[in-house]
Image (cartoon, rainbow, N blue to C red):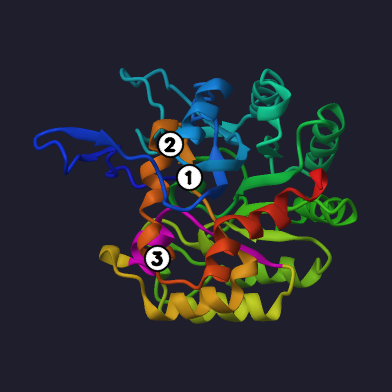
Amino acid sequence: MPNELISTWTRDPSKPGSLTPLKGSNYSIFDAHLHVVNFIQETPGGKSLIEAMDRANVGKAVIFGLPVSKMWSEFDRDQPNYYLANDSRCYYYAYTDVIVAEMVRSLPKEQRKRLFPLVCGFNPCDRYGVRDVKYLLEQYSDVFVGIGELLLRHDDLTALTYGETARSNHKALWPVYEYAGEHDLPVLMHQNITSVSKSDYPVYLYEFEEVVRDFPRTRFILAHCGISRRLNVPFYHQMIERLLDQYPLLVVDYSWIIYDVVICPNGKPQADWIHLTENFSDRICLGSDLVTKFEKIGPELQRYDAFLDELSQKARENICWKTAERTYARKNT
C-alpha cells in the first residue's frame, strides 16, 4: 500500500507558478506489485491501468486483486473504502480473481501481454484453499501466472479479518505451496516478520523460514521485505541479506514503506542497502504497491530514482526489470 502523502504533481521550472504531472521514473520499470481492485473490490478498469502505465514509464506489471473485502457495517454512516477507514471487519472474497481475470480479458492482446496476474482470492486458513487455486488457474489458464499477494501476518488487517489468524506456516497453505512448486508458480506473500509490540525482535520470522525451508523448490517472493506499518527491527538489512543468502530461490520486492522507512529514509539512500542490492540484484524487484489509484503509479515509482541512481547499471537493470521478468514472466517466455 502506498505512501498516501505522495503528490501526482510537481512545479514546472520553465513555467513559474504552474504545475506539471509527475511522469514516473527515469528508468523503465516492470512494476512487480500492483493491486487493481481496492478494499471494496472496485476497479478503474484495464483501459485506465494501461493509460497510467504508459504515462508512468511502466512497461509491464504484476497485478492482482485483494483477497479480503471491507464490510460496510450497519452502524457506520460513512462508506469505508480502505481497511483502516474504520473498525468494521474484513472477510475473504473469492470473486476478486474473476474481476481481475475479466478485466485482463477485456483488453487487446498486445496490452494483455504487459500484465502478469496472480490468484489471491481464497482463505489461506481453509484446507479447501488449494482446490480454489487450482480451479481459478484452470478456468483462466490464459490469464494467471502465479499466486498472490497472500495477506498473512499484516498488522491491523490481521485483527480486522474474520476467522483464524492467517500466517505463512498455516498448514492449510502446505498443499498450495506444493502445487506451486510442482507447476513452477511464483508465490507472493505479505508476512510481517514481527508484531507492532515486538518491533525490536523478528517474532514471526520463524513462520516464514519454516516455509522457505520446507519447500525449497517453490519460488517465494516476500512482499516489501516483510515490513509493515510501525515495524522496523534492528539490523533489517542483515536479516534480509541472510535470508537471500540462505534460501537460493527466495526473491524480495522493494515496495510500500520499506523504501521510505528503511532503505531511503528522508530521501537518503542507505549504504548498507546499496551494498545488499548490488550483491542480490537478481533477487530483488520493485513495486508501487498501489491499491488502484493508478494516477499515482508515476510518482510512486519516481521516488525510487534517488536510490536507483546510486546503483551500477547491472543492478539497476535487474531490480527495475529483469528480476521481475525472470520471476513472473517465465510462462510467457
Q: In the image, 134: left or right of 203?
A: right
Residue at point 65% right, 60% down?
323
> Is label 1 in contact with label 2 (beta carbons under 8 Å)?
yes
Q: Nearer the viewer, mark 3 or mark 1?
A: 3
Residue at the spot 66% in from the left edge and 80% down from the top edge? 245
Q: Are marks 3 and 1 in contact (CB under 8 Å)?
A: no
**Is 305 included in the stretch rendered in magenta?**
no
Q: Earlier in the sequence, mark 1 or mark 2?
A: 2
Q: Earlier in the sequence, mark 2 or mark 3?
A: 2
Separation of marks 2 and 3 at Cα, in angstroms? 30 Å
Please name the residue that numbered disc 1 is placed on: 157
The amino acid type, in three-letter code, at marker 1 is Leu
Q: Nearer the viewer, residue 296 or 126?
A: 296
Residue underneath mark 2: 83
- Badge 2: how crowded within 10 Å, few (<14), some, or many (20+)? many
Q: Residues within 10 Å of mark 1 (few under 14, many from 20)?
A: some
Residues drawn in magenta: 250-264
